[in-house]
Image (cartoon, helix red, strand yellow):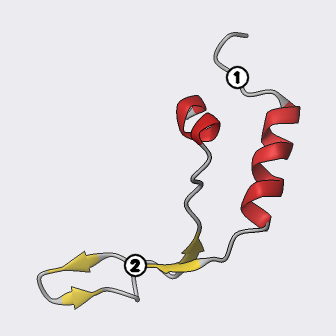
Amino acid sequence: MANTISKEKISKILNIANKKPLSKASIFSSYGPMQNIRRSKICWPSDKWIKTLL
């Protein structure tokens, strides 16, 4: 399967993500933040190999 990510790579990504601080995610509109629609926390990987993979 050429379009899959190996378990090893997934594990590496999760290990990296678990070490990064989380930020509040939100949806913005012309009325301002809409926290009632999206309440989650996110992190953005800065590792080049992850960006390339995705």
Task: Sort mark 2 into few (<14), some (14-19) or many (20+) by Cα contacts within 10 Å.
Answer: some
Distance in Å between CA atoms under marks 1 and 2: 29 Å
Left or right: where does residue 18 sit relative to residue 25? Answer: right
Label whose residue precedes the other's in the sequence (1 or 2): 1
- Tally of marks: 2
What is the residue that sits farthest to the left in this orientation?
Answer: 30
> What residue do we see at 60% from left, 30% from top?
53
Return the residue nearer the eye: 29 or 16.
Answer: 16
Q: Position of residue 4 (x, y in %)?
A: 70, 22
Q: Residue 37's quadrant in the figure?
A: bottom left
Above or below 45: residue 8: above
**Is 10 positioned to the left or the right of 2 in the image?**
right
Q: Residue at x 40, y 88 (%)?
A: 36
Q: Which residue is mark 2?
A: 26
| SS under mark 1 | loop
- Residue at image coords 73%, 10%: 1
At mark 2, the secondary structure is loop
Rendering quarter of residue 26: bottom left
Q: Nearer the viewer, residue 47 or 28?
A: 47
Q: Which mark is residue 14?
A: none
Q: Is residue 35 above or below residue 51?
A: below
| Depth check, front residue: 15 or 39 | 15
Residue 4 image label: 1
Q: Nearer the viewer, residue 43 or 40?
A: 43
Q: Amino acid at mark 2?
A: Ser
| Picture coordinates of residue 49, whole percent (x, y) | 63, 35
Given the image, on which type of amino acid does mark 1 rest? Thr
Q: Are marks 1 and 2 in contact (CB under 8 Å)?
A: no
In percent of width and height, residue 32 lies at: 21, 89
In which quadrant will I find the C terminus?
Answer: top right
Residue at position x 55%, y 79% in the image: 23
